Amino acid sequence: MSKSSTTFSELEDGWSYRMRLRIRQLVTIEPDEMRALFWSFAYFFALLCSYYIIRPMRDEMGIAGGIDKLQWMFSGTFLVMLAAVPLFGWVAKRFPVPRYIGITTSHGRSHTELMQIMRTEDLDFVQFTYNIGNRVVEDTLLPLAADRGMATLINRPFQRGALFRKVKGKALPEWAKEFDCQSWGQFFLKFVVSHPAVTCVIPATSKVHHMTDNMAVNFGKLPSPSMRKRMLQYFTSLKKATKQDFSQSSRIVWFCRSCLESNCPL
């Protein structure tokens, strides 16, 4: 008995493994999404099956009652639906779908008004800008949202691409692997989502490979508070180095321009 059970279990595992492989050949799907995919497929399959089973039965019942009476069956169907639609509308109104009310901004100059509204209105969520290069909301909007029990949606996590320009040509630190970070995009996003008052981040992109890289932030570890400080220190040091390099480059350009004007100070 034990041997038979084990054999059946092994066969079942082998079948499910082959099925997952075949599905992944058609669509990109993670292992933890298999259950949701199965139930959604089963729901639509059952819905369509019921439709295509009941419809022929209805037609056969109408024909069995006499073709001359078929018009009455369709008229009856029309009248029933005419009564059912208002009833459905009443039920939908009686048990409404949950709605969420929020307010959004992407400009720092609107934060004062946003804070005023957050203090006086019962909002479900607020949306504003927050990233490793722009952290002014850490002392204002984020703690206020946490105190008021409001969800937060973070826009412009890459500062409209400015963060990538600041780290261009710079290597991602090795210690970023400690929180499963593989790219600068993930570095910036994980800094945002690891804040305890952040609910969701909405990076904008038009490229599929950027979206795939962004979605990887949903998996793996998030940086701890001490790691967030380390990330900030590292990013700040890169900014300082960039300013210094720019200053030196400007000096070289000035000398070259002086040479061109035959007024070299050297």
Image (spheres, rainbow, N blue to C red):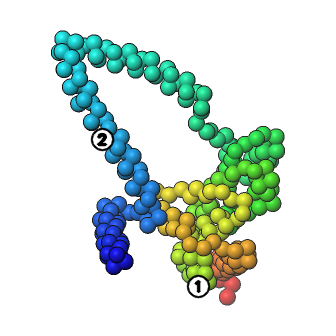
Labels in figure, total: 2
Nearest the eye: 243 or 183: 183
- The quadrant where residue 187 appears: bottom right
Instruction: Categorize mark 1 by other alpha carbons within 10 Å: few (<14), some (14-19), many (20+).
Output: few
Q: Residue at x 21, y 17 (%)?
A: 65
x and y, in percent, of residue 209 in the image: 43, 65
Q: Please give the label number shown on residue 174.
A: 1
| Residue lying furthest bottom | 266
x and y, in percent, of residue 253 in the image: 61, 77
Ranked by sequence position, the earlier of labels 1 and 2 is 2
Q: Please give the label number shown on residue 187.
A: none
Whether residue 263 is visible to the viewer of this picture, yes or no, is no
Q: Amino acid at mark 2?
A: Cys
| Residue lying furthest front | 1
Q: Nearer the viewer, mark 1 or mark 2?
A: 2
Position above or below: 69 against 208:
above
Nearest the eye: 51 or 209: 51
Secondary structure beneath dot 1 equals helix
Nearest the eye: 187 or 161: 187
Position above or below: 258 against 35:
below
Circles 1 and 2 in contact, beta carbons < 8 Å = no
Whether residue 158 is visible to the viewer of this picture, yes or no, is yes
Q: CA distance from mark 1 to mark 2?
A: 54 Å
Q: Is residue 133 left or right of residue 143?
A: left
